[in-house]
Image: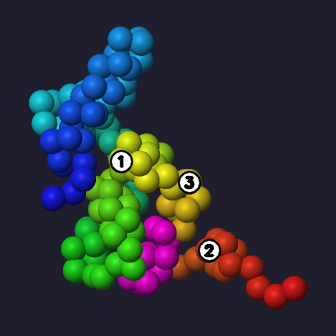
Amino acid sequence: MRFWETTAFKELQKEWYAKLKDAGFDDAEKNTGENEVIKQYAVNAYSNQSDIRISAKQDYFSILRQNVESQAFDRAMDKIIMCMIADGKRIRDIQDALQMIGEYRCRNAITLIIRRYEMRWGIKTYTDKQMNKYGGK
C-alpha cells in the first residue's frame, strides 16, 4: 500500500482540504468520494496537442509504470516518488505530499531522482549539466 492510500493520509488530506475551502481557496480538483480529479472533461486533457504527442505521453507513463512495478530502487523514497510520477502527479504535488509525511525534498532533488531512473531505465537521456554533474576544475 502506498502512503497516500492509507487512512491516516486520507484523513489528513480531508482536513487540509476543509481548511483550504474555509479560507476561500478554489481548488482545481474536485472530490469524487474516493479520489480527487481535475475539474475538466477528459476530451480537453490533450486539446492542444498532436496525436503523436498524446501517444508519446501515454507510452511514457505506461513504460514508467512497468518499470516502477518491476525494477529495484536505491531508496524507498525513490520508489514513492517514481510511483507518484507514474500516476501522473506533478513535482510540486509530490513535494507537498512528502512534506505532509515529514519528508522534505526540494523540487530540484525530486527532478534529479526522476531523471536518474529515466536514464537507468532507458526512457530518456540527459546531459551531465542536466543531471547537476559538473566535471573538472
- Which residue ends up furthest to the left in the rendered image? 33
| Residue at numbered disc 2 | 131
| Residue 77 visible at all | yes
Was residue 36 drawn as part of the magenta stretch in this picture? no
Colouring rule applied to residues: rainbow
Sequence-earlier tag: 1 or 2: 1
The residue shown at (30%, 82%) is 72
Considering only vertical position in the picture, is 1 above or below 59? above
The residue shown at (17%, 47%) is 6
- Of circles 1 and 2, which is in front? 1
The residue shown at (49%, 52%) is 104
Sequence-earlier tag: 2 or 3: 3
Which residue range is magenta in the image?
113-124
- Which residue ends up furthest to the right in the rendered image? 137
Question: Which residue type carries mark 2?
Answer: Met
The residue shown at (24%, 28%) is 14
Label disc, if present, on residue 106 of the rendered structure: 3
Label disc, if present, on residue 101 of the rendered structure: 1
Question: Which residue type carries mark 3?
Answer: Cys
- Of circles 2 and 3, which is in front? 3
Which quadrant holds residue 74? bottom left
| Residue 94 visible at all | no
Sequence-earlier tag: 3 or 1: 1
